[in-house]
Each structure stands twice: as structure tokens, then as C-alpha cells.
Image: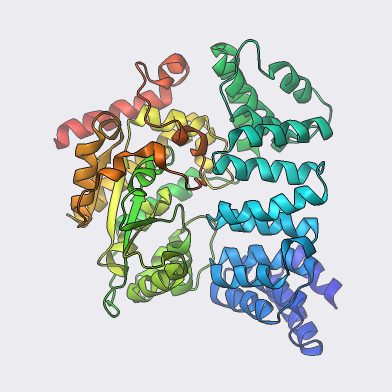
Amino acid sequence: MLASAEALAGRREWDAAIAAYEKVLALAPDDPHTLVQLSYVHSLRGDYRRAENFALAAARTGTTDAKILTELLPRLRTFNRGAELLACIERAGPPARMSIPLLIAAGAQLSYLNLPERAIDYLDEARRADPDYPTTLLARTQILTYLGRFDEAERDVNRAIRRAPEIAQGYWLRAGLRRQTAEHNHVYAIRQELARPGRSTDDIALLSFALHKELDDLQQYDEAWQALMQGCRAKRSRLNYDPRTTQHLFDVLRTFEGSGTAHGDGGPTPIFIVGMHRSGTTLLEQMLAGHPQIAALGELYDFTSAMRYTTDRHCKGVIDATLVERARSVDLGVAGKRYLDGVRWRLGEARYFTDKLPANFLNIGFIAHALPQAKILHMVRDPMETCFSNLRELFSDANPYSYDLRELADYYRGYADLMRHWRARFAGRTLDVEYAQLLTDPESQLRRVTGFCGLPFDPAVLELGSRRRGVVTASAVQVRGGIQIRDRPKWATYERWLSPIALMARTIGSMHGRNA
């Protein structure tokens, strides 16, 4: 019966698969494996609440089966059920009693919850159990990078590459750890791996982005550009992205009207830091993390989860047009309460906290109704710098628009139009923070920011070098270097190839001029 249910799910026959799994559950009530599978299938069908309920039911069984937990932990993280996820990990026993696959799974999920300081404990144990297992070494490299322990990260990734030179991820992780030199680089090794027969498109993307980074460090810009384009083509080829769907989402959001009912005293005050990826959101949060009244929580998907629950819509990406339509007829105050309840375990006594998921710019219309006390900081960076930085970053599948010059330019244009709409629609609810001014005059900008948030200015926000918190973003390496001001923007070296982005940037610039 399980085999039949799995076959139906494999054919995407969701209703039939659900019926088959429920027959299994009738014969074996509270079977955690079946509950986890039902959670997956309901997610794929788009039913958020039932998918979450089945994941929570699986957690309540108290299972300590390592194989089941490796599937259950990411299920719980999908719904941002951090407390339940942590309880499952604790129940599995001390790290010394856990299998290596479960230790790696626990480390990954703790990292996704922005808890790298906890994640490293599990990966340390996995490394002690088998010091040469490449999967452990690469996972540990990533977490050590988030923690700013770059020398240790480089030792682990070098060891992984010696043990398994065919794993492309290692070269990509290693390339980003430091600036390469003519005397010390890995260009030849990366090219050798790119020539290895049978490379997948994912491998080609990883290796090409690694090659681009190292060639750029070596100022071999023509070859660096060719490597970047090879990586972008490989990544884009495996992504199902339609720019028309994105434009429709932007259009639907501009027509959104909603309502919310405040619950209780409103709870703690969220400070949302939004904008395009690579616009400086990590830098701003890292600065605010020095304020004694602010808990810096990193990139959270908790508001996305709250909206999915409130609209009972499980979608790919932060939101989709169907979720927006459903949001018109729900009480967004429910989403606000669920969001605050969901993050409370992270806060301690803090009354203010940052949530720096850049893509929450899509959620501003919902946030304004759901959380009347919320402060929204919008990072604004030069379009050329922002887009070029996106183009050079190998993201997960979350930013599929960033691997094609025209699609990236179109996305930025849609984002800029939407932000103009939000500013007009919710006047006074958002504060633009200019990235360039944050670099050149951080004190005046941070005085603006703290004043907007209703907080006193504290000089500690300027002491960026004193931060020791983990940074679980693509900016983990750069932000550790402190504030850096370039004489010449990075994109200028590649300007002759960037005409689609340059045309968009000129259009955006002329519109800003007219608005001014």
C-alpha cells in the first residue's frame, strides 16, 4: 500500500496519493513515516494547514528513528516550527549518540533557522566520528563561514577536496573564502574539474561561478566574464522561471487592499529590513545588532509562513498571485499574531527585533495591516551595483531571475515600481536607507534609522568590528571585512557587457529625477 501511494505521488496524482496514504494510516495510526509523507503530499497539493498538521502530528509521535527524522526536520523547518524542530533534535539524544546523516541534517536545519552557533556542535561531532567524510567537511565549511571562522573553513574544504575532488561544491565554497593571488589560486584545478566527463548542470554552475570569482580576483576580466556567463546559463537552464508570472504578481500586489485586527498590546516591535538581495540588508542588520534593545534574528521566513497559514496556501517562492487573492478576504491580524507567536522563542526579553529577509518587500502590503507597530527599513542601492552583485551570486533556487541580464533588469524594474507604490500607499510606514550614505556617513544614517524605529541612538551600532554573531547570508564573508568604500564600482570593469542593466538603470534614474 505504501508503494502504491508513493507511485501515485510520483505521478503527481495528489488526491489519489493522499487517499492511499490515509488508508495506510488507518491500519497503522500515528505511524510517523506515513504522517511525514502526507505532509509532503499536502504541501505539493498546495494545502498549507493540513501539511503543517501532519508534520506536527509526526513530531508528536516522539519518533527517534534517524531516517524518519532526516525527513521530518526539514518538514518542520518548512513551517518555521522552530520549537518543535529543536525538541525533535534534543529527543534524538546527545550528538555522540546520533548517526552522521542525522547530525548533518540537524546542522543544516539549525543553520536554516539562523542558529549556526548550535549547528556547529552537531557538525563537530560528525567530524569527530569520521574526520574524512566529505559531506560533513563541506557542511562544516559552510557553517564555519557563517561564523567568520575562515581559516578553519579553508582547512575543512581543502580536506574535502583532497578526499573527493569530484564534488563541485567544494571549489565554489573555497573560492569565496579569501581573495586569490597569482601565487595562490585554484584556477587550473577548477578548469580540470569542468573538463571532467559527465558533469551535471548543477556542477557546471558551481564550478563556473568558482572560476569566475578566482579569475576576477586575478583581474583576468574577459575570462572571468566568460566563466560567469557559463555558470549563469547552466543555472538558468534548470530553473522553471517565467518573467510574465513575476510581472503578474507585481501587478496584483499593486491592486491589493486588505485589513487587519490588532490583537492584544501588539507584542514586540519587528523591524523589517527589505530590498533587493545584495542591497546592503546584511550590513544594516549587523550594525543594528549592536543596539542593546534590538535582537538581530537574521533572515526569517516566519512572516511568509504566517501568510501561508492564514490563506491556507502553500506556494513556491515567498508568495504567489493566488495567495494575494486569498489575502483580500482574510483578517491579516491573524497572520500578525501568528508571526509574533512564532518568533517569540527567539526573543528573550527583547522588545525590538530585526527580520532581514530582503524579499519581504513583496509582503509590505500584508505587513502594514498585520503588524501596525512594525517598522520597515528599505535598503536602496545603485541599480547597477545591485544587479551586478546579484548576477555574480550563485543563490539557491530562490532568485531565478538573477541569471539572465534582461530578466534581472526586468525584475529590478518591477521591484522599483512596486516600492514606489508601497511608499505612496503606506506613507510614513517605510524608511529608505541609502546604502552609499550608510557607508560614507554611518552615524547620521543610523540616527535616522533608530529615530524612525522609536529608539534612542546608541554609539555601539557603529562598532561593527565587535560583532561575533553568525551571519547566515551570502554576505557572510564581505560583512566581516567591515565598511569598504570602492574608488570605482565593481560593475564598471564589466560595463561593456551590461547594456540591458545599464538601460534599466538609466530609466530608473530618470524616473527618480522626475519624482524629485
Q: Nearer the viewer, residue 158 or 251?
A: 158
In the rendered image, residue 128, in percent from the top left (x then y), is placed at 78, 49
Q: Is residue 98 above or below residue 282?
A: below
Q: Residue at x 63, y 36 (%)?
A: 235
Q: Nearer the viewer, residue 48 or 14?
A: 48
Is 198 displayed left or right of 480 in the figure?
right
In the rendered image, residue 80, in percent from the top left (x then y), is placed at 53, 66
Q: Is residue 328 above or below residue 360?
A: below
Is 398 displayed left or right of 130 in the figure?
left
In the rendered image, residue 350, in percent from the top left (x then y), is placed at 35, 64
Q: Is residue 234 visible?
A: no
Q: Residue at x 36, y 68 (%)?
A: 349
Is 382 displayed left or right of 151 in the figure?
left
Q: Residue at x 35, y 31 (%)?
A: 383
Count of number-bearing discs:
0
In the rendered image, residue 53, in percent from the top left (x then y), is placed at 59, 79
Question: Where does the N terminus fall, quadrant-wise?
Answer: bottom right
Q: Nearer the viewer, residue 325 or 102?
A: 102
Quadrant housing residue 11:
bottom right
